[in-house]
Amino acid sequence: MKNLSLAIVLALGLVSPALANHCPMDMKKIEAAMKTTMADDATKKKVMELYNKGKSEHDAGNHDASVKDLGEAMKLLGI
């Protein structure tokens, strides 16, 4: 049981930094796509709201929420 608990703690410790690095990659993809997107203004506005929310969450250390919001923004852009 002790080994299982240790394994879970180690696994969680490895996931958080991976998500922290994932956010900036997603933000770069969104920034690049926004330069060429043919989406309507309402979609662009929603994408930027999600982008800004995701960036704030990343900066605050809430990487799970950041990845979720940035992922929604990428879906809207078709990436």
Image (cartoon, grey):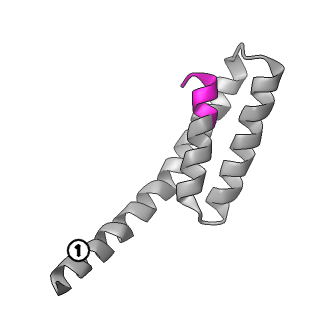
Quadrant in which the C terminus appears: top right
- Classify residue 5 by image quadrant: bottom left
Q: Where is residue 56 drawn, in percent x and y? A: 71, 56
> Is 9 left or right of 78, judged from the image as shown?
left
Q: Where is residue 1 drawn, in percent x and y? A: 17, 84
- Classify residue 40 by image quadrant: top right
Residue at the limit of the structure toward the bottom, as seen here = 2
> In the displayed structure, would residue 62 be above or below residue 37?
below
> In the displayed structure, would residue 68 be above or below residue 61?
above
Q: Where is residue 18 drawn, in percent x and y? A: 42, 56
Amino acid type of disc 1?
Ala
Q: Which residues are magenta?
A: 73-79
Residue where numbered disc 1 is placed = 7
> In the displayed structure, would residue 63 be above or below residue 36?
below
Residue at image point 67% right, 33% down: 31
Disc 1, SS: helix
Residue at image point 28% right, 73% down: 8
- Residue 77: in magenta span: yes
> Is 2 left or right of 64, judged from the image as shown?
left
